[in-house]
Amino acid sequence: MRIESLMVKNPLCVDVNASISEAIKLMQGNSIRHLPVVEKGGVLRGFVTLSDLKQGLIPSMLGDLSLTDLMIKNPVTVKPDEDVEDAAQIIYRKKIGGLPVVDDNNRLLGIITVTDILRAFVEMMGILTHSVRLDVRVGDEPDAFAKVSTIIQQTGGHVISVGLAPHRTHENIYYFRLSANGQDAIRQALENAGYEVLGVWQ
């Protein structure tokens, strides 16, 4: 999935010459926490967060502190044709809430945030659909996953998504999210074939 398909296009931004109070008002009025700072032509100059601006508001009233003093200069950016996984890794590793999306000339095209990525994950996993999750220990056989998948399908199960427990990879535990029907028969078929069903979650 490309970043372009998830990013907020033409996001709200603030001019590099704006005041700190103007930026805060813009963010609070639109319920956003990240704001790109641009100059003429939409070229990205920096990135600010609401918490950083609030911390600098009073000092700015007492001195010469400006928006450019508080913004993150040369922020980490991504391109619209990059993969969403790349953005997710950057956000996770750098512990940041969002990334500006720019073109080859550093012009602002959009922004992608943790919320956008989480929404995509929820949709891809089918978490909000009418479904159930089967947790199955598939064992160490090389073709165990294929066998379990076949049993599910042959018993009438429709697989929406599949995940592997990252913290229990040595146990080969898979999470099968299925359409919410026939789960009892599927569980019985798996257990009859010798696979351990750890749970069925609505």
Image (cartoon, grey):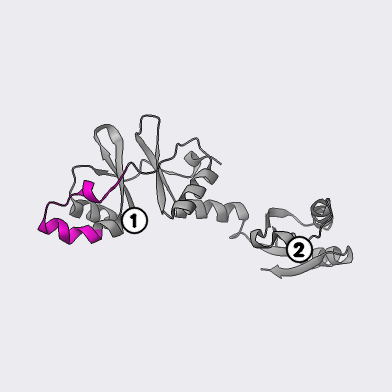
Estimate how packed mark 2 is, as few (under 14), some (14 to 19) or many (20 or more) residues with alpha carbons within 10 Å.
many
Q: Is residue 53 magenta?
A: no
**In the rendered structure, which segment of residues is drawn in magenta?**
54-73
Would you say residue 190 is visible in this rendering? yes
Callout 2 secondary element: strand
- Compared across the picture, whether 45 is left or right of 184 comes to left
The quadrant where residue 111 appears? top left
User: Dots 1 and 2: beta carbons under 8 Å?
Assistant: no
Q: Which mark is residue 33?
A: 1
Outermost residue toward the left? 62
- Distance CA(mark 1)–CA(mark 2): 40 Å
Place of residue 172 in the rendered image (x, y in percent of width and height, measured from the top left): 75, 59
Mark 2: which amino acid?
Answer: Val
Callout 1 secondary element: loop
Mark 1: which amino acid?
Answer: Arg
Which residue corresponds to the image point at 21% horizontal and 58% vertical from the top-left?
A: 56
Q: Is residue 65 magenta?
A: yes
Place of residue 194 in the rendered image (x, y in percent of width and height, measured from the top left): 87, 65
Q: Which mark is residue 136?
A: 2
